[in-house]
Image: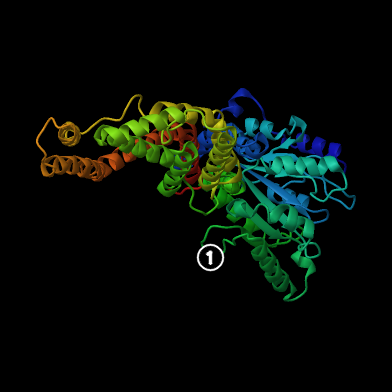
Amino acid sequence: MSENAAAAAAEHAGVRETRGPGAQSATTLALDGPLRSRLDALRELVGLSRTRVDSKTLAEAGKVLDEAASRRRLSGRHTVVAIAGATGSGKSQLFNALAGVTISETGVRRPTTASPIACSWSDGAGTLIDRLGIPGRLRRRPVQSPEAEAQLQGLVLVDLPDHDSAAVQHREQVDRILTLVDAVIWVVDPEKYADAMLHERYLRPMAGHAEVMFVVLNQVDRLPGEAAELVLDDLRRLLDEDGVALGEYGEPGAAVLALSALTGEGVGELREVLGQFVAERQAPARRIAADVDAAASRLRPVYTTGRRAGLSEEARDEFAARLADAVGATAAGEAAERAWLRNANRACGTPWLRLWRWYNDRREPPTGRMRLRPPADEEATARQRVEQAVRTVADRASAGLPVPWAQAVREAAVRGAHGLPEALDELAARAGLPPGKPPRPGWWPVAVLAQASMTILQIIGGLWLVGQIVGFMAPNLGVPVLLMVAGIVGGPVVEWSCRMAARGPARRYGQDAERRLREAAAGCGRARVLDPVAAELLRYREVREQYGKVVGVG
């Protein structure tokens, strides 16, 4: 019988689906709170990831959200179940047996089912079938007793073309509709139940949808004796290898049955199991949940690596130390300390030594002061140190992150590094040695007075001796010599004492200068590099939390 003839016969029998306005009205699908939360988290996850993850990677998650939203707007009282199988598996024969009337064409010509055919056991499923793209001429109603029809109330059964059809458009229709239905009945026969295409292209990738799958071994009437049980056991073994959980002992998973659509053996059991499955009205939500699980599984490498990620305090401190070295904080502190000691020596040294140092300073510039502009080679070395510091902290911050987020962290660090060497040079000029001479401690006037006293003693002793030489004063070498020796020896002693006393303040002055420069360099690096990197890490933590909600963790 041809397809047109079958359609005419079905229409004549009054089995074509009515599509009046009243038939379309149905209660929309309601999802439980956890599933709604997972969908909301997935939507938030996609939104947060658009600027970091390529659109191709997010396409499947977006499709899941779109299909879930589309399904939620449609009937929640109906369950759409597709019958899928290979050529010659008898799926159309099983479709007719469940409907109780010949609706889908069967025969020896391959492929037989050229277009999907829908059969609805109740009104109000029109929009669901519209979503599948099945035209009105391919929609049917079963012809059964009221008791049998009530058993499958709410079922929408779809007979698909052969998934191994030679016609490409047939396989495309199968793949398209399988993404839209609530559940699938896979029909296999004793000859092709182990077909690699079925297991590798469909069952294995859809293992996460086991709760909305039935696997039916058809044509068991062709198997003699215990052969049916042996084939059924081998089928279960293959499904176990595919990762399809078998829901045979109350646990969630696929139901596996053996039957003969030709003789009717086992069809009643399938109808009973299918009726209970439809009556629960959980298949649409389970299908959406399985789709979310599949999308989350494929997105897992994008959001988690199983390794600890983040920027440790040790890495932050090391980055600050590298910047301080690049800007010459240690050298600046040493220069500040030397400048403080030089100022002390100038204030507390003997007049003759100060005069000598003044003469030397006039001959060559003093050392110990921090240069505002380093030589070109030193400037290039400092720039290389800054770049190395940025690369190191970026590598440490991105370690353990998935590729898109690691790349985002590195890009944030590189953007912040632009202009960082120049900014550090300006900081070195501002935060280095303050203008003018270093401050003097309170005891310096006393030291200056003591040094002046030693100088006065030398002058008095010298004048006394001169007066004795010219005969102006009575000869007495002891006192003037003693005064001169006291002044000559006392001056260096005072200077040495001041130098010892100045070491502590000079060291503290140098440490303060080094600390200011280190803090300034660390603040500049934090503002330009660490803060943008931390913002990217915070964004990753947000999407990681959303991903945890998508997979149902946390």
Who's the residue at 82% across and 42% down the image? Answer: 170
Q: Quadrant of residue 519?
A: top left
Can residue 488 be seen here? The reply is yes
Compared across the picture, whether 334 is left or right of 36 comes to left
Residue 445, compared with residue 97, is above or below; it is above
Q: Foreground residue, 500 or 408?
A: 500
In the picture, the quarter occupied by the N terminus is top right
Q: Foreground residue, 23 or 322?
A: 322
Compared across the picture, whether 341 is left or right of 260 comes to left
Q: Foreground residue, 257 or 260?
A: 257
Pinpoint residue 157: horizontal percent, then vertical percent.
67, 44
Pinpoint residue 63: horizontal percent, then vertical percent.
63, 36
Q: Foreground residue, 448 or 94?
A: 448
Pinpoint residue 315: horizontal percent, then vertical percent.
45, 47
Pinpoint residue 360: horizontal percent, then vertical percent.
41, 32
**Dot 1 corresponds to which residue?**
249
Q: Quadrant of residue 154?
A: top right
Compared across the picture, whether 1 is left or right of 497 comes to right
Q: Looking at numbered disc 1 in the image, what kind of residue is underneath it?
A: Tyr
Q: Tell me the element at label 1.
A: loop
Compared across the picture, whether 399 is left or right of 202 comes to left
